[in-house]
Image (spheres, rainbow, N blue to C red):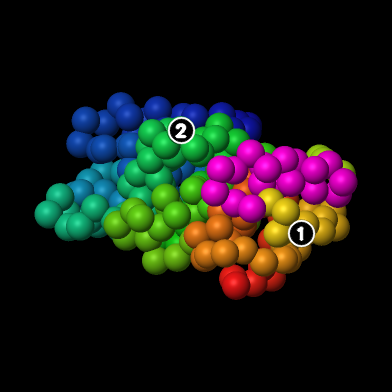
């Protein structure tokens, strides 16, 4: 008796063997000999051909067919296409560690998972996914790797403040409690307040920033 993994391999091979089928848009799942086809095909004839191809494979106990017909003229917003565009965009964006992230798309809704070192990487991934046509929403489940201690986080943020040619570091206070950072004090302009907040988010290990800085 074939294992589910072997059966999945055989079904995929049979779909690829049939010249009337475009298997790149078809997902194949196997559970206890039951094959599930998902994704989309370009015509009803191709849908029937995919079903017949699965039934030709020895060991298939049953077929659950969830394929949708999407003609070439239809908008390219199927879940596999959305996922591919997001992955491609991640690869092009140097601020996003694409090898540390996973993308799942279900009915246009994107779920991002993985672990990154910096908040700007998490934010960049979420914003990039939301730009893709066909995306109906984004669940950002990316987590930040919490390594530095609270004192280390505070020191790194203060050092970044002091390096700034625009921000008056003496007017800003920093409290760190684990990955949570609270900013206080006074600055001369909104631009300085934004610089301070960006610097705080840039520190590794920061998971949240509460900005209580007053512009005076």
Taking the image as shown, residue 57 lies to the left or right of residue 40, namely: right
Q: Majority secondary structure of the magenta segment?
A: helix
Q: Is residue 163 magenta?
A: yes
User: Which residue lies at the image location 40% right of the left edge and 28% below the top edge?
Assistant: 13
Taking the image as shown, residue 12 lies to the left or right of residue 1, namely: left
Distance from disc 1 to disc 2, alpha carbons, whole Å, reads: 32 Å
Circle 2 packing at 10 Å, graded few (<14), some (14-19), many (20+), is: few
Q: Give the mark toward the camera: 1 or 2.
A: 1
- Residue beneath disc 1: 173
- Residue beneath disc 2: 94
Between 4 and 210, the one lying in front of the other is 210
Between 60 and 120, the one lying in front of the other is 120
For the N terminus, give its image quadrant.
top right
The residue segment tinted magenta is 150-168
Q: Which one is earlier in the sequence, the residue at label 1 or at label 2? A: 2
User: Which residue lies at the image location 87% right of the left edge and 46% below the top edge?
Assistant: 151
Q: Position of residue 169 (x, y in %)?
A: 69, 51
The image shows residue 70, relative to residue 93, as above or below, that is: below
Q: Position of residue 215 (x, y in %)?
A: 59, 71
Q: Position of residue 80 (x, y in %)?
A: 38, 47
User: Which residue lies at the image location 30% right of the left edge and 27% below the top edge?
Assistant: 17
User: Which residue lies at the image location 32% right of the left edge and 37% below the top edge?
Assistant: 23
Between 98 and 214, the one lying in front of the other is 214
Between 189 and 66, the one lying in front of the other is 189
Q: Is residue 32 visible?
A: no
């Amino acid at each position: 008796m074939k294992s589910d993994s072997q059966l999945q391999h055989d079904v995929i091979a049979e779909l690829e063997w049939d010249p009337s089928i475009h298997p790149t848009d078809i997902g194949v799942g196997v559970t206890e000999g039951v094959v599930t086809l998902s994704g989309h095909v370009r015509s009803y004839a191709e849908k029937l051909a995919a079903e017949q191809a699965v039934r030709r494979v020895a060991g298939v106990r049953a077929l659950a067919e969830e394929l949708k017909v999407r003609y070439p003229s239809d908008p390219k917003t199927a879940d596999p296409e959305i996922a591919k565009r997001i992955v491609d965009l991640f690869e092009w964006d140097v601020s996003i560690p694409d090898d540390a992230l996973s993308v799942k798309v279900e009915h246009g809704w994107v779920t991002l998972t993985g672990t990154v070192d910096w908040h700007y990487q998490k934010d960049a991934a979420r914003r990039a996914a939301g730009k893709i046509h066909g995306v109906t929403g984004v669940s950002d489940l990316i987590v930040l790797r919490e390594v530095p201690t609270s004192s280390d986080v505070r020191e790194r943020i203060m050092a970044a403040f002091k390096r700034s040619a625009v921000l008056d570091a003496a007017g800003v206070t920093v409290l760190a409690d684990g990955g949570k950072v609270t900013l206080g004090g006074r600055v001369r302009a909104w631009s300085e307040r934004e610089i301070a907040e960006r610097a705080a988010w840039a520190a590794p290990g920061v998971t949240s920033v509460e900005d209580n800085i007053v512009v005076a």
